[in-house]
Image (spheres, rainbow, N blue to C red):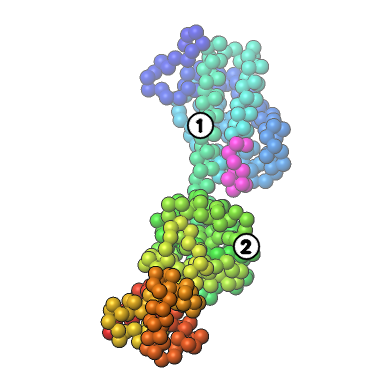
Amino acid sequence: MSDGVCEVTDASRRHPWADVPEEARDRLRPVVLDAGDEIIATVRAEVAEYALSMDGEFGRRIRLGVSVALDQFLDLLGTDEALPDTRVYFELGRVEHRHGRTMDALQSAYRIGSRVLWRRIAASGDDHGLEPDAIFCLAEALFAYIEQLAAASVSGYAYEQSLAAGSRQARQHALVERLCRAPGPEAPELETLARDAGWPVPRSVAALVMAEESLGTACRRMPPDIAASVVDRVGVVFVPDPDGPGRTDALADALRGTSAVLGPTVAPEQVPRTVTRARAAWSLHLDGQLPGEGLVRSEDHLLTLLLHADVTLTADLVAQRLEPLRRMTAAARDRAVTTLTAWLDAHGDVAEAATRLHVHPQTVRYRLARLKEAFAGVLDDPVGRLEVALALRAGSAGGAGGSALAEG
C-alpha cells in the first residue's frame, strides 16, 4: 500500500476486503457489532416507507439482515473469500416487491447503513490503531460489500417480479378465456376471476379482436385497465368503458399499423354478445368483406354481419329473390343489377336513379317496366323490395350469395 491506495499484492485476489489487515477484524468488532440499533433507528427516521413497517415480516428480515451483514463483514476482513450467503438480502428484495414498494427505499436503507457504520468507524479511529492506508482499504471494502448486498436484493426483487408477472399473466389468461366462452360467467364467478387477475369489473365492456402476433405491441400502447390474452390463436382484449371520453382515439392510436375489430359495448353479464360479434366481424375482415385498417367497429357493418350470419339462408334469399336475373344473359343481368341498385338506392326516384346511371330518365322507366314484369309484382311490394335489396347486397358481396346469383 502507498499514498493511500490499496494495492493488490496477490494477482489472484478479487475482493477488496482481502487488503484490509487481518488484525482490523478484532479491533473493529466492538464498533461494528454495536452499530445495528443505530442503523435501524436511522433507517426508520430517514426512509418514510419504513417508519411503520418494522413489526412485520419486513422488520424481522431487515433486523436479521443488519445483524448478519455486520457479522459477515467482520469475518471477511483480511480474507479473499466471497460472500458466503446472500439469501437474506435476496429475500429482502422479494419482500419489498410483495409489499408493493419499489427498490428505492431498500437502496436508501443500504446507503444509510453504510454511512452510519463508516461514521462510527471513523469516530473510533484513535482506538482501533489502523494505519491511514488500512483505513482507505477498509472504506473500499465496506462500500464494495454493501454494493454486493444491494445487488442480491435487486436480484430477489427481479425474481419476485418475474414470478408475479407470470402468475398475473396466467390469471389474466384464465379471465379472458372464460369471458370468451358462452354462456358467460355469472357475477360471482366473474368477480372472483377479475379479482384474481387484478382487473376491476367495469360497468361496460367491449371485446377487441386482432391477429395473435399484433397483441403484444397493441397492448403496450393501450390503457392499463384492459384484460388481454390469446384465445384460440386470436388476440382478444376486453376494453372497459370503450365509449368513454377519448377512449376511441386511444384505441385507434394503439392500433396504428395493424388491424382489429371492436365488438359492441355491453354490460359485463352480456359479454358473450360482444365476443361473438367481434369474432364474426374479424373473420369477415380477414376475408376482405369488411374494409379498412386500424380500428374497425363491428357496429358500422351490421348489415354485412347479418347477411353472413347464416350463409345458407342468405344464399336461399339470393336464389329466390333474384331468380328472374338468372334467366337473363350476362350482359342483360349486369344492366338489370345496376338499374335495380340505383333505383333502390334512390328510394324509387327515377330522376335520381337516371343521374346515378348517367342515362335518360325515360331509359330507367323502360328498364324498370321490364324488371317489374320479370319480378312479377315483387318490386311493387315494400317487403319484396327490401328482400330484393338485401339479395342484391349479398350477391354483390360474393360468397354464397354471389354464387347463387351467378348460377344459371
Q: What's the residue at 51%, 37% (across, down)? A: 152
Mark yes or no: residue 185 visible.
Answer: no
Q: What's the residue at 46%, 56% (across, down)? A: 294
Circle 1 packing at 10 Å, graded few (<14), some (14-19), many (20+), is some
Closest to the observer: 41 or 402? 402
Q: Secondary structure at mark 1?
A: helix
**What is the total number of numbered labels drawn onto the structure image?**
2
Q: Residue furthest top?
A: 3
Part of the protein shown in magenta: 95-106
Q: Secondary structure at mark 2?
A: loop
Closest to the observer: 213 or 156? 213
Locate residue 391: give its quadrant. Answer: bottom left
Magenta segment includes 272: no
Location of residue 368 with respect to 225 vertically, above or below: below
Q: What's the residue at 72%, 41% (across, down)? A: 52
- In contact (CB < 8 Å): disc 2 and disc 1: no
Could you say where residue 252 lies in the image, as x and y percent from the top left? Answer: 51, 54
Residue bearing the label numbered 2: 202
In primary-sequence order, the first of circles 2 and 1 is 1
Q: Residue furthest bottom?
A: 376
Could you say where residue 237 lies in the image, as x and y percent from the top left? Answer: 50, 60
Q: Is residue 60 left or right of residue 367?
A: right
Closest to the observer: 253 or 57? 253
Q: Is residue 116 left or right of residue 211?
A: right
Q: Is residue 221 left or right of residue 198?
A: left
Give the label, 2 or 1, closer to the camera: 2
Residue bearing the label numbered 1: 148
Amino acid type assigned to the residue bearing label 1 in the image: Gln
